[in-house]
Structures are given as C-alpha cells and as structure tokens.
Amino acid sequence: MLLVTCHNPFFELVFNQLMLHDLKTFRRFILYRKEDETGVSGTGIVAEGAQFSSGKCAFSWISDVPSIEIYDSVEEIERIHGHYGKTEIRWIDKPGA
C-alpha cells in the first residue's frame, strides 16, 4: 500500500489512516420505487445513497425539493420507505468489493 509523505504531519496522518481503513463495507445504493403509494416522489430511481462501515446509511432524494436523510441501518430504510415491497434498495457495489 502506498503511504503519503508530505510537509503537513496532520494531513499525512489523516490521509494515511483513510488509506488503511477497510472500505470493503462501504457500499452505494439507489432507492428504486416500483409504485408511488403517496404520489409525491414518483417511480424509478427516487434516491441515491451509501451505507458506511458503521452500518449507518445516508441518502439524498432526487426531487424538486431534495433532502438528505440518515438512518441507523438498511433495515430501517426498508421499514420506513419500503412500502411493503413497492420500494427497494438496489446495490451499486457488490459486498466486499
């Protein structure tokens, strides 16, 4: 693994820690809505997001009034926004990629 050496010790420490961090658990996803139950967000890709190595997730709605939401887990997103299978999480990155 290539480590960085520079004139700023703080930058060097932070950058090298990021390089050594296990990013295999970081994954991107989209929210795909097959049926719009409320008539607000439409169908198709309605949000884009990421799951972090902590398991927490953040996503941004794709709409005229975009907002960002943060959740403790993918399961929490599915429970709140899944609408009994009408909206699903589709992973962009494979596990451990």
Image (cartoon, rainbow, N blue to C red):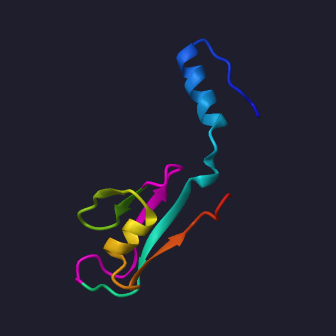
Q: Is residue 52 left or right of residue 61?
A: right
- Give the percent coordinates (x, y) of residue 21: 62, 39
**Residue at the (36%, 82%) spot, across then down:** 43
Q: Is residue 64 left or right of residue 29?
A: left
Q: Quadrant of the C terminus?
A: bottom right
Residue sitting nearer the eye, 4 or 27: 27
- Give the percent coordinates (x, y) of residue 1: 76, 34
The part of the image, by quadrant, that contains residue 84 is: bottom left
Query: Farthest residue toward the top?
Result: 7
Label count reads 0
Q: Is residue 45 magenta?
A: yes
Q: For the magenta stretch, what is the residue range?
A: 38-56
Residue sitting nearer the eye, 15 or 21: 21
**Residue at the (55%, 21%) spot, across then down:** 11
**Residue at the (52%, 73%) spot, across then down:** 90
Q: Is residue 14 magenta?
A: no
The relative height of residue 11 versus residue 74 in the rendered view (above or below) is above
The relative height of residue 40 versus residue 4 in the rendered view (above or below) is below
The relative height of residue 45 versus residue 65 in the rendered view (above or below) is below
